[in-house]
Image (spheres, rainbow, N blue to C red):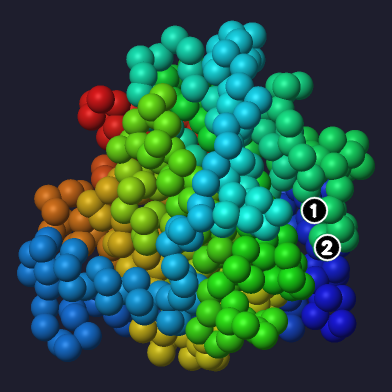
Amino acid sequence: MVKRLCGVALWAAGLIVVALSLGTTRLCPQKPKFAINYDESKAGNYTLPNPLVLQNGERVRDAATWTEKRRPELIHLFEENIYGRTPQRRLPGLHWKVFNVDRHALHGLATRKQVMIYFTRNEDGPKMDMLIYIPNSARKPVPLFLCMSFAGLNTIVNDPGIEAGEVWSFTAPWVRMPAAAWVKKYPQAALKFSSDWQVKKVLNDGYGFAAIYYGDLEPDFSGGIKYSVRRLFFKPGQTEPAPGDWGAIGAWAWGLSRGMDYLEADSDVDHHRVIVMGHSRLGKTALWAGAQDTRFAMVVANCSGKAGASLLRHNYGETAKSIYASFPWWFSQNFQRYGDQVDQLPVDAHELIALIAPRPVYLDAAEKDQWADPLGAILAADAAAPVFNLFGEQGLGITKLPPLDQPIMHTIGFHYRPGIHAVTEYDWEQFLRFADMHLKKRN
Ligand code: GCU
């Protein structure tokens, strides 16, 4: 009950945040009961775990040792200590049905299709609806952005043909409602979430665009486990996650990989050039999906913050303690141990970024989003660089925040822009440039 009330309070706070962030600076849901530091001179000294040292103390000197030995070790450490164990990849009964195909969607710009992905043989069990646009004028198969959305598929782009099904209520997240009614009930939130996407820009640049609603995997509140895909993996009689079990971020990331299972079979899509993208908690999710699943050719994590691209040990903005206190269901229960001793955490964000190597990864941060610790992401990228270097790839090459609106693009890319915690048109322009640089040439 208490947990549920907390969940409600958080969602109510979330609603206020969205409302306030529509026109003004984002107000972050910091918990005043935790000390939050915004003074770089007090961000503290720390020693990062060395990504290039195996647990037995041996050094990693080549790409093969990284891939065969260190990579699996680090995946395991992230599972054990932060996100929880991903129990199993696709289940044997996984299947899908393509529906709602329109070759003249968006005034002829694209072919739209929707795919219902059933995780097991049982079609009454959990399932996930993926919305896909393929640009009509581009040469097939196309590279594609696979994105995870906070809101229903009818908020992605103005296409009256989308069949969006049901979503979770915004203020009572255990209640399902038709997606169309959701948009009517929360018009401002709908507008805010719609502004995350630049579907036409992406299509015009020759990329496909696909979106999954994260609530299809698990609604985002403390009681969400009741309706989560995580239940598929419970042992008989189990009703709550055990210590070490995965959290919601793990489940959302798992959903992105199930989306990839379908994309591998779609001849319109070049499954060797799929970019996984998410914002904020879904940026954390995109990083964790890309870290685990090497089928993703590139990762874009927008304003992903702590437990995303920013170092947990860098004491600036959100902390390990406050994130777990506010969103315990995102994580393995083991993560809680590190609230008061983050220096004991066997991994940090630099190793999450390193797990993407040698694939390109794009990060960004916003000036009015200090909660997400912009510099912490630069420091993490810098400490990830030696792993990229093993493959002959280049990191960011900076240890300070770059000037605003001056993107840096190597195999790791980054920009810092004015404004709030959001995904903007400018952000998308950079994602596209970065994708063009790395993936277009690979056609
Ligand atoms: C909160 C949370 C962040 C998260 C963000 C979001 O602010 O503290 O860690 O990134 O929500 O997902 O919008």
Q: How far apart are marks 2 and 1 (CA)?
A: 6 Å
* Closest to the observer, 289 or 176: 176
Residue shown at the point (65%, 25%) measured from the top left? 100
- In this orientation, does residue 373 appear? no
The structure residue drawn at horizontal position 85% and vertical position 68%, both measured from the top left corner, is 8
Kindly indicate the quadrant of the structure image that contains residue 52.
bottom left
| Contact flag, marks 2 and 1 (Cβ < 8 Å) | yes
Q: Is residue 287 left or right of residue 225?
A: left
Residue wearing tag 2: 174
**Residue 13 shown left or right of residue 63 in the figure:** right
Instruction: From this view, report whether residue 397 is shown above or below residue 61.
Output: above
Provide residue 89's location: percent of width, then percent of height. 43, 62
| Three-letter residue code for mark 1 | Trp
Q: Please name the residue that numbered disc 1 is placed on.
A: 168
30 or 128, which is in the foreground? 128
Q: Quadrant of the N terminus?
A: bottom right
- x and y, in percent, of residue 163 in the image: 73, 31
Q: How many labels does the image show?
A: 2
